[in-house]
Amino acid sequence: MSDQKLKIQDDAEEGYKKQEVFLKIAKSKEQNERRIERMKAVNVYIDKLRQETRATVQNQFAEDVDGYKELLKDLLLQGLIKFFEANVLIRCREQDKDLIEEIKDEVIDKYRNMIIEQVKMFADKSPEDIPCNIVIDENNWIESIDENPETGSLGGFNMLAKKGKIVLTQTVDSRIELCFQAAIPAIRYMLFPSMRRVPKPKAE
């Protein structure tokens, strides 16, 4: 075979390889674009579901103040147990101030009794020996959903100790977000079959 024919053959093979690479790149780009579009669709759906959930919870709290009050008790007790601090600062929505003032003494009593019952080193102490003081920060209110439907809080509070060095988020919004983050894979699986991962075949 002459040198000229070899050169033509080499050029053709090189052209085929370049075309193959180009097609692979184009296919990969198309797949990525489709994947991005699916992810956008998932995010749009989840954002819509999140807003609907917030609206539902807001209405439930408005209709059932006693139920919301019980939730605040649970959040406060849980926070005190996690904190185990003598002095706690509460940052809440201004509209929740009276509710928290109303429940805090009851929750402190329950907290003290639980510590005595469940922590051996305090078994011989009396409830009054367990230091616990709760103060509401009236200079820094959490923005309410009534003020800002997009970013305002549904309720709950933040707890601070050690001059703000320790912060615990006990808001309703943070709990909802945790639920959504845990549910995203299931939502994606149910609503977007094309995004389900195909199980790898088991090795023989």
Image (cartoon, rainbow, N blue to C red):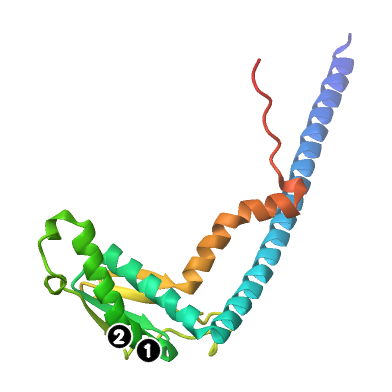
Query: Where's the C terminus, which quadrant?
Result: top right
Residue to which mark 1 is pinned: 97
Q: Identify residue type, mark 1.
A: Lys
Q: Nearer the viewer, residue 135 or 116?
A: 116
Q: Is residue 127 above or below residue 58?
A: above
Secondary structure beneath disc 1?
helix
Q: Which mark is residue 133?
A: none
Residue 202 appears at what percent x and percent y?
A: 65, 22
Taking the image as shown, residue 151 lies to the left or right of residue 131, namely right
Q: Position of residue 31 (x, y in %)?
A: 76, 46
Q: Is residue 84 visible?
A: no
Question: In the image, 54: left or right of 67?
Answer: right
Mark 1 surroundings: few (<14), some (14-19) or many (≥20) residues within 10 A: some
The x, y position of residue 159, in whole percent, is 32, 74
- The reply to whether discs 2 and 1 touch (Cβ–Cβ < 8 Å) is yes
**Observer-nearest residue: 175 or 201?**
175
N-terminal label among 2 and 1: 1
Whether residue 1 is situated above or below residue 118 in the rendered picture:
above
Q: Which mark is residue 136?
A: 2
Q: Position of residue 12 (x, y in %)?
A: 86, 25
Residue at figure coordinates x 63%, y 77% from the top left: 56
Q: Is residue 181 left or right of residue 17?
A: left
Give amino acid for label 2.
Ile
